[in-house]
Amino acid sequence: MCLAIPAKVIMIEGSIAKVDMMGNERVVSIDLVPEVGIGEYVLVHAGFAISVIDDESAKETEELLLEVANAYEEGE
Amino acid sequence: MLMKRGSKESAAKAGILLAEIESLGQSPFTIMEVCGTHTVAIAKNAIRELLPKSIRLVSGPGCPVCVTSNGDIDRYLYLAAQKNVITATFGDMIRVPGTEKNLQELRAEGADIRVVYSTQDALELARQNPDKEVVFLGIGFETTVPTVAVSLEIAKREAIKNYSVLSMHKVVPPVLKLLAEDEQLLVDAFLDPGHVCSIIGIEPIKFMAEDYGKPGVVTGFEALDILEGIAMLLRQRAEGRSDIEIQYQRVAKPEGNPQAKMFIERVFERIDASWRGIGIIPQSGLGIRADYSPWDAARKFSLPVFQSRETPGCRCGDVLRGVIYPTQCPLFAEYCTPMKPIGPCMVSTEGSCAAYHRYAQRSVD
Ligand code: SF4
């Protein structure tokens, strides 16, 4: 029930945003993340954006894991 | 790109994490995944089968539908049967059995029951049906609660008089405390719920590590997230630490979501609540504050109190506390299936019994 899906914000009007959710356009409420800007990713649960996804830390985790992966492959 | 990972890269990463888990996980370690969404992800990705035998994963009380007591279910069924009431609910609740029937059967008898995707839809129903009472069934943890709080705020602001919420919401920290104190349950560490913590942050669950010596990692929901969460817990054990850490950093911040917390605080107050199979847990539920009483279905309608009782033979309560695996319930699969569920742990798609059944899991012990 706590399932949430990432989506990209494409338009904001008051407390409503239009988002791209895996290729589909959806309208969600942004009352819980008023700081969100166009182009940012949010996590959507039950029609509400509940969190702004931190693209930087997503990338960092990604890079860190990739580094380890490369080291691991080289070591093989 | 965010979230998209090449399958080759993912396989390499999974291999590294599994190698680490293998080397750190040689002595017995029991991890509880608190959240129903984790239970489903673990079953779907067959993660139990990938782990060394010494590492046990048990499911916890993190499916809001499953922990709703029979007394609460009978109460909302009574309300849904009233003339002039439109019941708005998330789809998960439709087939959950009460003492005599479920919402689907009530609908077949003529009750007006609508499945909504969000509380905004429920508000819209109220706007469009001014001569009807629209009641939203408030079930869920801290992830869902702020979305309900916003709807009550809007109802108050716009004076939408025919909208109300029957709040059966629950919060996670008190049940964690109970699990930490449960002597039947031998859990060493917790995979903490990523989305609940994206709202409340880690402060409210720090006591688990600090006072009870139960480390936790706030974990995301992809297979790699879960493997990393398990590896992080094992690293803590190897280093002799007990902390609450965040694996799911791209979403969950240590401080949570301040705006969402503010909405919860403004609209709801802590009350004692009854959990299926567990009983009353003090201060574990959320009631609607007096300021919002015109929108509180429990105050608006006179509802009888129904006794909570367990479905005979159903061991949902033990499953929810991680004391048994679903497969250890004598009714599992033979008498109780997703098509003909006996208990809510089999009805809800996030229930442990349903997850085990769907992905044909075996208990690993
Ligand atoms: S298998 Fe069915 S009867 Fe047994 S605990 Fe699960 S829901 Fe209850």
Image (spheres, coloured by chain):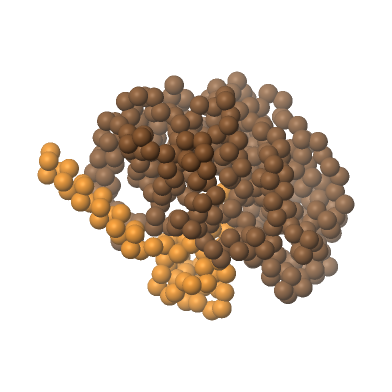
Q: Is residue B58 above or below residue B268?
A: above
Task: Name the residue at 30% across, 59% down.
Answer: A59
- Tell me the quarter of the picture where residue B18 sits: top left
- Whether residue A59 is visible here, answered yes or no, is yes
Task: Name the residue at 60% across, 64% down.
Answer: B262
Is B136 in front, or is A52? A52
Q: Position of residue B86 (x, y in %)?
A: 77, 58
Is B337 in front, or is B22? B22
- Whether residue B36 is visible here, answered yes or no, is no
In this picture, residue B58 sits left or right of residue B147: left
Q: Chain A appears what colour?
A: orange
Task: Name the residue at 68% across, 39% down.
Answer: B281
Which chain is painted in brown?
B
Q: Is residue B177 above or below residue A36?
A: above
Is A23 in front, or is B223? B223
Image quadrant holding the C terminus of chain A, namely top left
